[in-house]
């Protein structure tokens, strides 16, 4: 093995060690958040089951573990909410050595907004998509003459399976901005990928909503707007990058001429 190959292997080992260390930090925070989430699980549970949507059902426990299972799901969601900004920070710190100083400062500003967008996604999913979907499914069930007997696990799993994907999708603008800032993405590439992105977002919307046009439309439009907003943000950052590169090149040319 040559010297260059040994150096590449050492660099790869260092990168993997650094990545493992940051993953351990993220998992540690998630566990701490999980423990903290157990303390707020009971009032959150009371709030969710006291809502208008939940009051129309008699929720049952079909397993001895249903109660603690729901508390664990609420705690896990709480832990994820507080972990998302930290995850983005660790991602930024991992790629930081490969960024220029101005890119480092600009990228780290995005971290606090991950929390805001995640909460916005949770609110959109819980207060808009979830009631709409629940109403549709129960209407179909009642029209079939079926007696509704639901378990508490069924109710919360149905809720989380809708809310969590939407909350994660609401991070799309920040992810695109971050990847544009570190020059992995640009608006040209995003526009070329638009048809595939649209297909993926429509597919997600159809999967998590009832099989009717109105529900699909109400969820698809915000997701497509999120993508277009992401393209706009990417173009804004890309133009600033091009201007900075041109300015740097002009400075270099002037120094060469001097």
Image (cartoon, rainbow, N blue to C red):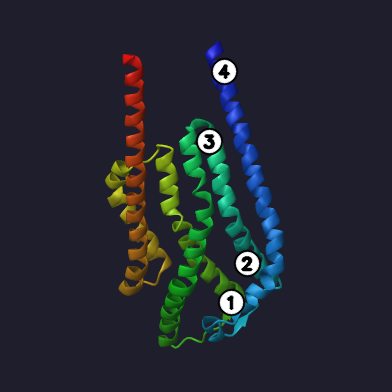
Check whether the beta carbons of the residues at disc 4 and disc 3 lie within 8 A of each other: no
**The N terminus is located in which quarter?**
top right
Q: Residues within 10 Å of mark 1 (few under 14, many from 20)?
A: some
- Between the residue at mark 1 and the residue at mark 4, the CA separation in whole angstroms equals 55 Å
Q: Residues within 10 Å of mark 4 (few under 14, many from 20)?
A: few
| Sequence-wise first label, 1 or 3 | 1
Disc on res. 48: 1
- Between the residue at mark 4 and the residue at mark 3, the CA separation in whole angstroms equals 21 Å
Q: Residues within 10 Å of mark 2 (few under 14, many from 20)?
A: many
| Sequence-wise first label, 1 or 4 | 4
Image location of residue 86, percent across then percent down: 59, 49
Image location of residue 131, percent across then percent down: 46, 77
| Sequence-wise first label, 2 or 1 | 1
Q: Secondary structure at mark 3?
A: helix
In the rendered structure, the answer to whether residue 224 lies left or right of residue 142 reads left
Check whether the beta carbons of the residues at disc 2 and disc 1 lie within 8 A of each other: yes
Which residue is denoted by mark 3 in the rendering? 96
Which residue is denoted by mark 2 in the rendering? 74
| Sequence-wise first label, 4 or 3 | 4
- Between the residue at mark 1 and the residue at mark 3, the CA separation in whole angstroms equals 40 Å
Image location of residue 72, percent across then percent down: 66, 65
Residue in the picture at 64% in, 75% down:
45
Q: Secondary structure at mark 4?
A: helix
**Outermost front residue:** 258
In the rendered structure, the answer to whether residue 98 lies left or right of residue 192 reads right
Check whether the beta carbons of the residues at disc 2 and disc 3 lie within 8 A of each other: no
Q: Residues within 10 Å of mark 3 (few under 14, many from 20)?
A: some
Image location of residue 97, percent across then percent down: 53, 31
Q: Quadrant of residue 183?
A: top left
Disc on res. 7: 4
């Amino acid at each position: 093995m040559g010297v260059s190959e040994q150096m590449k292997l050492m660099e790869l080992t260092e990168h993997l060690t650094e990545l493992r260390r940051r993953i351990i930090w993220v998992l540690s925070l998630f566990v701490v958040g999980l423990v903290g989430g157990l303390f707020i699980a009971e009032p959150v549970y009371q709030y969710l089951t006291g809502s208008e949507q939940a009051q129309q059902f008699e929720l049952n426990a079909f397993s001895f573990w249903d109660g603690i299972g729901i508390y664990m799901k609420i705690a896990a969601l709480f832990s994820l909410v507080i972990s998302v900004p930290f995850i983005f920070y660790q991602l930024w710190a991992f790629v930081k050595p490969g960024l220029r100083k101005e890119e480092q400062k600009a990228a780290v500003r995005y971290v606090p907004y991950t929390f805001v967008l995640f909460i916005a996604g949770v609110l959109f999913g819980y207060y808009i998509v979830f009631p709409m979907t629940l109403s549709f499914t129960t209407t179909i069930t009642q029209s079939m003459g079926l007696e509704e007997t639901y378990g508490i696990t069924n109710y919360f799993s149905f809720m989380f399976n809708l809310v969590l994907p939407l909350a994660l999708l609401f991070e799309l603008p920040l992810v695109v901005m971050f990847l544009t800032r570190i020059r992995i993405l640009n608006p040209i590439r995003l526009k070329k990928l638009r048809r595939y992105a649209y297909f993926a977002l429509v597919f997600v919307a159809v999967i998590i909503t009832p099989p009717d046009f109105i529900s699909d439309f109400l969820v698809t439009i915000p997701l497509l707007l999120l993508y277009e907003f992401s393209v706009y943000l990417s173009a804004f950052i890309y133009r600033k990058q091009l201007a900075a590169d041109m300015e740097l090149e002009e400075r270099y040319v002037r120094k060469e001429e001097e």
